[in-house]
Image (cartoon, grey):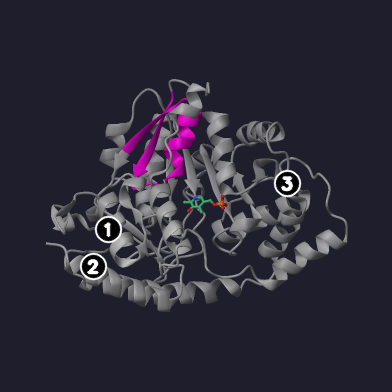
Amino acid sequence: MRLSERAKAIKPSPTLAIDGKAKALKAAGKDIVNFGVGEPDFDTPDNIKEAAIKAIRDGFTKYTPVGGTDELKAAIVEKFKKDNGLSYEKDEIIVSCGAKHSLYNIAEALFGPGDEVIIPAPYWVTYPDQVILNDALPVIAVTEEKDSFKIDPQLLKNKLSGKTKALILNSPSNPTGLAYDRKSLEKIAELAVEHDFYIISDEIYEKLTYDGFGHISIASLSNEIKQRTIVVNGLSKSHAMTGWRVGFAAGPKDIIQAMTNIQSQSTSNPTSITQKAAVEALTGPQDFIPNMVAEFDRRRKYMVERLNKIKGVSCITPIGAFYAFPNVASCYGKKFNGKPINSSLDLSAYLLEQAGVALVPGVAFGDDRYIRLSYATSMENIKKGLDRIKDALSKLE
Ligand SMILES: *Cc1c(COP(=O)(O)O)cnc(C)c1O
């Protein structure tokens, strides 16, 4: 086999080892509580499904314009106006096969050899690999819990160089659940304008926030910052539509055009039927969202409280998304049956094998001190899983 250098540069995700094991154990009949999931455990609302069924019946089953239908782009323009105070023209919008696909198109349109892209850690697993796939260099900036995992302006300055092309921001964040307030965003925006780099703002968890936190898009701070920001969003999380594959991006017209050209030579348009469903998701009733958020909120509070009561675990309270991100570093150096636990990968493997709980080791997100637990699963599972974790950690010596 003679793979490309590019293919060889991509490491298999460390989450796959755990996921593979969890599936094998489940298949062997073992009762596994899965905290590894990265999607809402809610079904797509019926009105959205109906719109897709109608699209099929109406024969809306052909190619559409590559970057999305006019109807959907108009709905997205409205969404940005209403939710974010941002005004875009339709030619500043692209619809892709998921937010991940929009992010990939951005990476292809902007990054190349010699470019550096700053990624605050803990980060979403995909960002560094998308940078590497486009021959650029990810520059990781490890943020700290004491700063609520926000990138401090001084840390950002330290990572800047003449080669800095962009900063990838994710607020609210997967995996930490933290989100940027206006003041922090203003400081980042100032640096972006001063040092002339792009901001790629992944806002996929915008609608999933708690305790009255109001999401702010960095692009809305000024016209200067809007000119160098590409906002990415989608319906996977807000409308429980992960399998439908639709996401979108908004930004300067020339960048969106380049992304559309790239999309025209790779996937072509996102599924026609999904686009009809997306119009309904954006323009139809929205009461599904607060109901889902209220349920996530209940689980969030329960999970964080329970985690903080476990000896050796401390967990900050997330204000967005559906993940808890506890610090478990004080468990490292301990042993079970003589076998040492020295990393998030060791601990995750231990919890899976001994407690039947699947979760994602922090090393996958660039910080080995943590583990990620998703609360996009039933309260019953959450209770059971936390009982098991508590029990298993008490057996470490
Ligand atoms: C889920 C997720 C995405 C991708 O969502 P799509 O299903 O591709 O729309 C993007 N960013 C983050 C941080 C996510 O968690």
Inspect the image, locate mark 3, and give the three-letter code of the amino acid beneath it: Gly
**CB under 8 Å between discs 1 and 2:** yes
Inspect the image, locate mark 1, and give the three-letter code of the amino acid beneath it: Tyr
Disc sitting over residue 350 in the figure: 1
* Ligand 1 neighbours mark 2 (CB distance < 8 Å): no
Where's the C terminus, which quadrant?
bottom left
Q: Nearer the viewer, residue 256 or 300?
A: 300
Tell me the residue that label 2 is attached to. 392
Q: Earlier in the sequence, mark 1 or mark 3?
A: 3
Label 3 crowd (10 A; few <14 / some 14-19 / many >=20): many
Magenta residue span: 115-140
In magenta stretch: residue 389: no
Q: Is residue 229 above or below residue 111?
A: below
Cα distance between the residues tagged 1 and 2: 8 Å
Tell me the residue that label 3 is attached to. 68
Q: Residue 272 appears at what percent x and percent y?
A: 77, 51
Label 1 crowd (10 A; few <14 / some 14-19 / many >=20): many
In magenta stretch: residue 126: yes
Disc sitting over residue 51 in the figure: none
Label 2 crowd (10 A; few <14 / some 14-19 / many >=20): some
Q: Is residue 102 left or right of residue 350?
A: right
Is residue 70 visible in the rendered structure shown here?
A: yes
Of tags 3 and 2, which is closer to the observer? 2
Inspect the image, locate mark 2, and give the three-letter code of the amino acid beneath it: Ala
Cα distance between the residues tagged 3 and 2: 50 Å
| Quarter residue 189 falls in | top left
Q: Is residue 174 left or right of residue 355?
A: right
Q: Is residue 113 left or right of residue 384?
A: right
**CB under 8 Å between discs 3 and 2:** no
| Quarter residue 53 falls in | bottom right
Of tags 1 and 3, which is closer to the observer? 1
